[in-house]
Image (cartoon, rainbow, N blue to C red):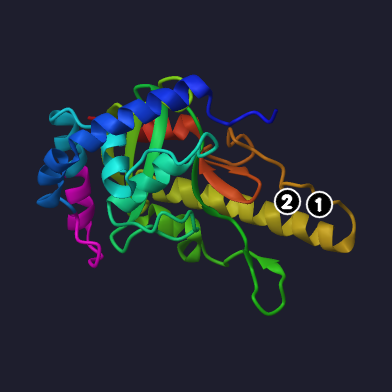
Amino acid sequence: MKKHRIKTEEYSFIKKEEQIRLNRQNQFKQLTDSLMPDITKDSIVEAQKAVKLVKEMKKHGYDIFDAAVLSKGYVVTNQNDTHGKNRAWETFFGGRGDGKPTPDAPWGEIKLSQIVSEHKLEQIMTVGSLSKKDKETKERYVEDKFEDSSTYDKLKRCFITTYFQDGKQKGREISESFIFEVENEAWFSRIKEDWEHYKAEYLDRYSKYKSGEIKKRASGVMKSDTLGSRCPNGTLGIRSDGIIFTKQFFQEVSKHYAK
């Protein structure tokens, strides 16, 4: 028998919690309606509204499951739906919820991340794709400038919310919410230098792959570096073709905004 990605015990728990959220969603909606950001506007004000809404949710005892149920009607669709909660969180705030390497909403990127304790990521946080495919030539390429990359686009104004781990899929309690802006002088030069490092590495390896010097792996031409050990500042890592925040850098950022 094929194993499900969500254990039966956790799936049953989630489904019971869904019903609790369904029973109180009208009450929850009364809170959210007046605080929801305007999806049509590209403004820091709208991102700040999103942060305020999360803080009000936490203050009044609401959680990630409440947002998912109000947005989608459920937390997960089946026992293999391990990404449903995050997608529902994005759509709750008016985002697309499709996982594409572009910002989720005009006012910014929407991120929901699970933590094991205050400021400590449980999983990686993807912040853009390093390379793109040319529609005509089908060849892979990387933008010349960091400021034109999907990582810059996602981090230009990134609304991040963290919640506490509970088992694998039961996590729902909100920890904190903040807006990360890559152009902040505390981050910009460090992140840009690390992105440029991976760009140079990718172009070198892609060239060697095209010439037959190296073989392409299932994950792509790059070797994973989730710790950011190969780049100068350790702010970014890479897995397959995805640029990620390292856990160490996320902890620094999270503590900074918690001040």
Q: Residue at x 38, y 31 (%)?
A: 252
Q: Residue at x 45, y 61 (%)?
A: 102
Label disc, if present, on residue 225 of the rendered structure? none
Residue in front for this viewpoint, 154 or 208: 154
* Residue 104 placement: quadrant: bottom left
Residue 136 spot, x, y in % from top left: 68, 80
Picture layout, residue 158 above or below residue 105: above
Q: Amino acid at mark 1?
A: Lys
Residue 133 placement, left or right of 158: right
| Residue interval drawn in magenta | 37-52
Residue 203 appears in the rendering: yes
Residue 46 part of the magenta-drawn span: yes
Q: Residue at x 19, y 40 (%)?
A: 25
Could you classify mark 1 by the number of other residues whose Cα lies within 10 Å: few (under 14), some (14-19), or many (20 or more)?
Answer: some
Residue 233 spot, x, y in % from top left: 52, 39
* Residue 113 placement: quadrant: top left
SS for callout 2? loop
SS for callout 1? loop
Q: Residue furthest bottom?
A: 136
- Residue placed under numbered mark 1 in the picture: 216
- Residue placed under numbered mark 2 in the picture: 220
Residue 171 appears in the rendering: no
Residue 197 part of the magenta-drawn span: no
Residue in front for this viewpoint, 85 or 26: 26
Residue 248 spot, x, y in % from top left: 47, 29
Residue in front for this viewpoint, 63 or 244: 63
Q: Residue at x 72, y 77 (%)?
A: 137
Q: Amino acid at mark 2?
A: Gly
CB within 8 Å, label 1 to label 2: yes
